[in-house]
Amino acid sequence: MATQQDRERSLWHIGTGAEDYFLLPRGALRANDRPIEWSEDGAQRAVASWWLDGVARMQLLMILMRFGAFDLGDEAAQRRRLTQLLQSGVLVALRRAHDPLPQTESDDDDDDDHGGGTGPRPPEKTWIEVELVTAAGQPFANRRVRLELPDGTAVERTTDAQGLCRADGIDPGTCKVTLLDVDKVAWRPA
């Protein structure tokens, strides 16, 4: 059974506006998780939809690297491999719940015109973790990464020995990830 740390390391968030998903290896599922059962057509449509979003595509490419399938030659082969991973159940998808914040009696007073409320609650803080691996699945250590955060600020991090870097306490939303130490000869855009 996967530990919490293993689960967090192998969880990818794919958000394309209408729906958000978490993708993870089947071995990282918890007993109460309910993965989506994909038909071939459903998996193809999901991958095609995700592929159109630049941030989601970056996550999908990271997934392909994790499963040793990044260097497939072209985008169509990469999308086919992702579809196969989903349909076979090697890679599973969980719908991300969008639960509204619970409202309490004191929250009801915040909207009145008497000025006694504290105003709306700020959104909860979250985190982003980036894992860089080679095409062979080995950690890519000591690589600089720039993270453009949802609030517009940018931070730089360096991957550790496991190819990981992380930013905590950030606002929810989309982050842009830029690899700063990429060998331009070896890098191919998706």
Image (tube, rainbow, N blue to C red):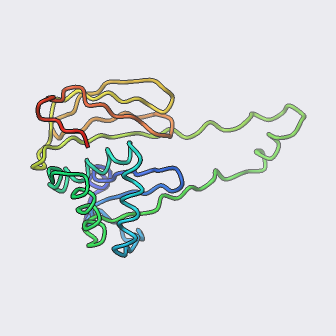
Give the vertical position of 36 relative to 47 (above or below).
Answer: below
- The picture places residue 147, in percent across and down from the top left corner, at 36, 30
**Most distant residue in the right direction:** 114
Q: Quadrant of residue 72?
A: bottom left
Give the quadrant of the N terminus.
bottom left
- The picture places residue 136, in percent across and down from the top left corner, at 9, 49
Seen at 40% across and 64% down, the residue is 45
Along the line of sight, the residue nearer the viewer: 51 or 135: 51
How many badges with numbers are in the image? 0
Q: Quadrant of residue 28?
A: bottom left
Along the line of sight, the residue nearer the viewer: 74 or 109: 74
Seen at 24% across and 26% down, the residue is 180
Is residue 160 toward the left or the right of residue 98 in the image? Answer: left
Is residue 179 toward the left or the right of residue 133 in the image? Answer: right
Give the quadrant of the C terminus.
top left
Seen at 76% across and 45% down, the residue is 107
Seen at 32% across and 51% down, the residue is 8
- The picture places residue 167, in percent across and down from the top left corner, at 37, 33
- The picture places residue 57, in percent across and down from the top left corner, at 34, 47
Give the vertical position of 151 relative to 99 (above or below).
Answer: above
Give the vertical position of 102 relative to 111 (above or below).
Answer: below
